[in-house]
C-alpha cells in the first residue's frame, strides 16, 4: 500500500448512496459535485428559474421541490447526468445535503480544522471508518504541509495525528520518510501524489466517500424462504442474533442470524416455527431479555418461550384485531393495542394489569419512548359513508368513493405515568406505523392517503420536544396496506420504509434526501423493514413475495479501482430446503454494468 | 396483496356480520327495507364494506332478470346477500351497483 490514496485510488462509482439496482452509471447525491468536476465543466449560463409557490401545479398537493429532486435523482440514475445538472441549475435544487456540501468544501479548500467535524456530521460512518477517514484527511494535510515546505508543522501532524490514527507501521514509516524529499517535485513523485493544486483533494474526497459507502447496507446477503405466504412483519431480538417473522401463512418463524459473523459462514436458519395461530399473524415483539416472543393474530395474543417454541399463554381480552405489541423498556411487561379501542398493559407473565379503554382511536400501532415518559398511539380512520351523488359506486374492497376523513386527531401522545393525553398530532389519512428514536426525541409515522383528494403517502418525523413536524419523507408507495418504517444506522441517521411497489426506500433523516431505493424483492409490497439493533450495517425486510431479505454493507475490504459494488450472487434456491443461504461472491471487478435488479430476479 | 385491516364504519347505527361482527354497512346508506332475500327480509344498501364478491350470475327475481354477484364476509366467509351488477328492466336500473344484505344475518355492532 503506497503512502497516498492507499485505500482505493480513484474509485469510480463508490459511495454509500449509490443505488445498486440501476444499471451502469448510478450517480449519487453525495458524489454529484465531484462527478461534476470530473466531467465537463458545468454550463454556467443556465439561469435559475424563479417560480411562485411551492407546489408543482397551482391545484396540486405535490411539493415541487420534492418532486423535482426525485426527477433529478432519476435522471442521474439512468445516466442522464447533463440533463440532471441542467435541471439542478434551473430549479436551484441541488442534490446535496448541507452536511455534504460543507464536507466537500472543507476538503477542496483544505479547511482541515473543520474537516473532521464535518466528516462526523455526515453520519454514515461508524468508528472504524471514521478513523480510516480521519487518517486519509490527516495524510493529505501532512503532504500539503510538506509540499509547502512547512516541515515543522508537518512533523506535528505526523506525530499527533497520523501516528495515532494509523494501524500500519510500514505505512507510517513510508510517510515519515517523505520528510527527506529534497523538493516538492520529488515529494509528489515519491508519494505518487499530484499535489495540493492537482487532483489530490478530489481523489481524497472519492476515497472518503468510499469509506462511508462501506457502512451502508445495500446488498442482499441472504434470502430467507420458508414462509408459504406473504410475510407481514418482522422484529429483531434485542441480542441482534434472532429475527422473528410473521405473516399470512398463520405462522411465526424465529430465525437465527449471526449478525457479527461473515455472511459466507454465519449460521442462518429457521430455529422454530410457531404454528398455533388460526389466522394470519400481523404482530410480533420480543421481551427485553429475548426469552419471550409475543405474537398476535386477530384478537388473540400468544406468549411463546422463544427457546422451546412452547406457547406459555394465550390472551383473549381483546375483542377485535390486535394491531400493536410492544415490550416496556423497564421490563415490567408489555402493552397491546387493538382495533377494539383497547390499550392493555400486561405483566411479563401475561396477566392484564390495566385496561385503558376506550381509546379515542382504533389502535393500528403504538410505541413507548425508551425513557418511559410517553406512549404514542396511532389509530384508524373510520369511514362515514354517505349516499353518493349520481351513479358512483365504491370500488371493490376499496373505500367508498366519497368517504370523508373524520376530523378527529388520530395520533395521540400520552404521558405514560398519568395516562393522560399530552399532545394530539393532526394527520390525515391512514396511519399504519409508529416508531420512536433511540434518544426518545422523535416519532416516525407512516401516513397513507385515505382518498384521492389527500396528499400522497408520506412518512412524518415529529420532534416530540418541540411538538413540531420536522421532516417528511416521500417517494415510496402506500395506499391501503399496512406498511412499516424504521430508524436505522448510527444514531438513527437513516429512515427506511417498505413500499407497495416492492422497493425499500432509505432516506437521510435530517435532510430528507432519498438515499436508496433498493430492489430485489419480488412482486407485491415490502411490508416492513427492521434495522438490526446490534449491527448498524444490517437490516431486514419482508415482502409479499414470501421472503425476508437481509441487507448488509459490502465487506470492508474496500473497492478496487474501477470496481463497482456487485450484488451477492443469488442462485436459484431449492424449494422446500427450509433454508435460504446465499454466499458472498465478492466484488465484480471491471466496469460491468449488469449488476442490479435484472441480474438477481429469481 | 399485502396486509390490510378490515374497514370500520361510523354512524348512528352500524350493521355487522352476525357471525363475526365484522362491520358491513351504516344505516344512513340504507336505501330500502322492502326487499326479500333467501332468509326473509333484506335491506338494500348504497355502500357495503368488508365483503368479497363472487362471480357474476344471471338470476330471475320477482322484479325481472338481473346479473348479480353473491357477497361473502371477508373474515368468516358467510354468504350475506348479493350485489346488483345489471338490471334488465328499465324500472330496476336504480339497483345497479347496490347491495342486498339479509336482515337475519346482520347484527348491530359498534
Ligand atoms: Zn363474518
Image: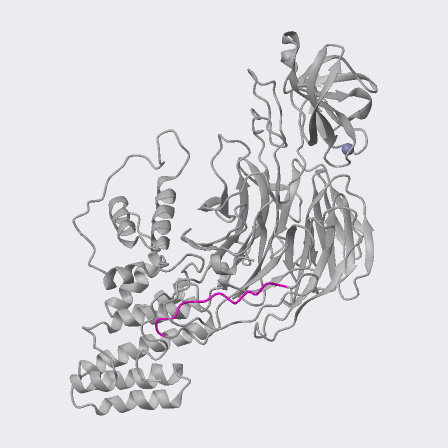
Tell which of A410 and B11 is nearer to you.
B11
Ligand 1 falls in quadrant: top right
Residue depicted at x 46% and y 60%? A596
* Numbered disc total: 0
Residue A521 location, x and y as percent? Answer: 55, 54
Left or right, A90 with reference to A513: left
Tell which of A376 and B23 is nearer to you.
B23
Please tell me whether residue A217 is drawn above or below residue B102 in the rendered image.
below
Residue depicted at x 22% and y 92%? A180
Residue A437 location, x and y as percent? Answer: 54, 55
The part of the chain drawn in magenta is: A561-573
Please tell me whether residue A126 is drawn above or below residue A479 in the rendered image.
below
Q: Quadrant of the N terminus of chain A?
A: bottom left
Residue depicted at x 62% and y 73%? A266
Q: Quadrant of the C terminus of chain A?
A: bottom right
Residue A156 location, x and y as percent? Answer: 29, 84
Q: Is residue A487 visible?
A: yes
Tell which of A566 and A98 is nearer to you.
A566
Tell me how the rendering is colored.
Answer: one colour
Left or right, A431 with reference to A13: right
Q: Quadrant of residue A320?
A: top right
Residue A101 location, x and y as percent? Answer: 31, 59
Q: Is residue A287 visible?
A: no
Tell which of A329 and A396 is nearer to you.
A396
Amino acid at each position: 500500500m503506497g503512502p497516498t490514496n492507499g485505500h482505493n485510488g480513484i474509485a469510480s462509482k463508490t459511495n454509500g448512496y449509490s443505488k445498486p439496482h440501476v444499471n451502469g452509471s448510478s450517480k449519487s447525491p453525495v458524489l454529484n459535485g465531484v462527478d461534476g468536476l470530473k466531467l465537463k465543466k458545468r454550463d454556467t449560463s443556465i439561469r435559475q428559474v424563479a417560480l411562485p409557490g411551492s407546489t408543482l401545479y397551482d391545484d396540486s398537493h405535490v411539493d415541487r421541490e420534492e418532486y423535482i429532486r426525485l426527477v433529478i435523482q432519476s435522471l442521474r440514475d439512468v445516466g442522464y447526468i447533463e440533463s440532471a445538472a441542467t435541471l439542478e441549475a434551473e430549479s436551484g435544487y441541488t442534490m446535496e445535503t448541507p452536511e455534504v456540501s460543507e464536507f466537500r468544501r472543507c476538503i477542496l479548500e483544505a479547511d482541515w480544522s473543520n474537516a473532521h467535524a464535518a466528516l462526523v456530521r455526515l453520519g454514515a460512518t461508524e468508528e472504524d471508518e471514521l478513523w480510516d477517514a480521519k487518517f486519509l484527511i490527516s495524510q493529505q494535510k501532512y503532504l500539503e504541509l510538506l509540499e509547502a515546505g512547512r516541515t515543522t508543522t508537518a512533523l506535528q501532524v505526523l506525530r499527533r495525528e497520523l501516528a495515532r490514527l494509523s494501524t500500519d507501521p510500514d505505512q507510517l514509516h513510508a510517510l515519515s520518510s517523505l520528510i527527506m524529499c529534497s523538493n516538492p517535485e520529488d515529494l509528489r513523485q515519491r508519494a505518487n501524489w499530484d499535489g495540493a493544486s492537482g487532483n489530490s483533494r478530489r481523489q481524497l474526497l472519492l476515497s472518503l466517500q468510499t469509506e462511508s459507502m462501506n457502512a451502508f447496507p445495500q446488498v442482499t446477503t441472504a434470502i430467507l424462504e420458508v414462509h408459504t405466504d406473504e410475510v407481514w412483519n418482522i422484529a429483531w431480538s434485542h441480542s441482534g442474533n434472532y429475527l422473528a417473522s410473521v405473516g399470512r401463512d398463520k405462522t411465526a418463524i424465529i430465525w437465527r442470524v449471526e449478525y457479527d459473523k461473515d455472511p459466507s459462514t454465519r449460521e442462518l436458519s429457521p430455529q422454530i416455527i410457531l404454528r398455533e395461530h388460526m389466522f394470519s399473524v400481523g404482530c410480533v415483539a420480543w421481551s427485553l431479555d429475548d426469552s419471550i416472543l409475543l405474537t398476535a393474530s386477530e384478537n388473540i395474543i400468544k406468549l411463546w418461550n422463544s427457546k422451546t417454541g412452547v406457547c406459555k399463554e394465550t390472551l383473549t381480552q381483546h375483542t377485535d384485531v390486535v394491531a400493536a405489541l410492544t415490550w416496556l423498556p423497564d421490563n415490567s411487561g408489555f402493552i397491546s393495542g387493538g382495533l377494539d379501542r383497547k390499550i392493555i398493559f400486561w405483566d411479563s407473565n401475561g396477566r392484564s394489569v390495566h385496561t385503558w379503554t376506550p381509546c379515542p382511536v382504533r389502535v393500528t400501532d403504538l410505541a413507548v419512548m425508551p425513557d418511559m415518559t410517553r406512549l404514542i398511539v396511532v389509530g384508524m380512520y373510520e369511514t362515514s359513508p354517505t349516499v353518493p351523488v349520481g351513479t358512483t359506486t365504491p370500488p371493490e374492497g376499496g373505500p367508498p368513493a366519497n368517504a370523508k376523513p373524520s376530523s378527529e386527531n388520530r395520533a395521540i401522545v400520552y404521558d405514560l405515568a398519568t395516562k393522560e393525553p399530552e399532545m394530539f398530532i393532526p394527520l390525515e389519512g391512514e396511519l399504519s406505523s409508529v416508531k420512536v428514536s433511540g434518544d426518545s426525541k422523535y416519532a416516525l409515522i407512516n401516513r397513507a392517503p385515505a382518498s384521492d383528494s389527500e396528499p400522497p403517502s408520506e412518512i412524518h418525523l415529529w420532534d416530540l420536544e418541540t411538538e413540531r413536524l420536522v421532516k417528511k419523507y416521500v417517494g415510496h408507495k402506500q395506499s391501503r396496506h399496512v406498511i412499516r418504517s424504521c430508524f436505522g444506522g448510527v444514531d438513527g441517521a437513516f429512515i427506511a420504509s417498505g413500499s407497495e411497489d416492492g422497493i425499500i426506500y432509505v432516506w437521510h433523516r435530517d435532510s430528507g434526501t432519498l438515499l436508496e431505493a433498493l430492489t430485489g424483492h419480488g412482486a407485491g409490497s415490502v411490508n416492513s423493514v427492521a434495522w438490526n439493533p446490534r449491527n448498524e450495517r444490517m437490516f431486514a425486510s419482508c415482502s409479499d413475495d414470501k421472503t425476508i431479505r437481509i441487507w448488509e454493507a459490502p465487506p470492508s475490504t474496500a473497492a478496487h479501482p474501477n470496481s463497482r459494488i456487485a450484488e451477492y450472487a443469488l442462485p436459484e434456491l431449492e424449494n422446500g430446503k427450509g433454508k435460504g443461504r446465499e454466499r458472498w461472491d465478492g466484488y465484480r471487478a471491471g466496469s460491468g454494468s449488469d449488476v442490479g435488479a435484472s441480474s438477481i430476479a429469481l | 396483496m399485502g396486509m390490510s385491516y378490515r374497514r370500520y364504519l361510523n354512524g348512528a347505527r352500524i350493521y355487522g356480520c352476525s357471525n363475526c361482527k365484522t362491520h358491513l354497512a351504516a344505516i344512513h346508506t340504507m336505501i330500502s327495507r322492502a326487499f326479500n332475500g333467501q332468509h326473509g327480509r333484506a335491506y338494500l344498501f348504497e355502500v357495503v364494506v368488508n365483503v368479497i364478491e363472487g362471480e357474476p350470475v344471471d338470476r330471475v327475481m320477482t322484479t325481472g332478470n338481473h346479473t348479480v354477484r353473491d357477497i361473502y364476509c371477508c373474515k368468516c366467509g358467510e354468504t350475506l346477500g348479493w350485489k346488483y351488477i345489471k338490471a334488465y328492466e328499465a324500472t330496476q336500473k336504480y339497483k345497479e351497483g347496490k347491495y342486498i344484505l339479509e336482515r337475519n344475518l346482520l347484527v348491530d355492532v359498534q
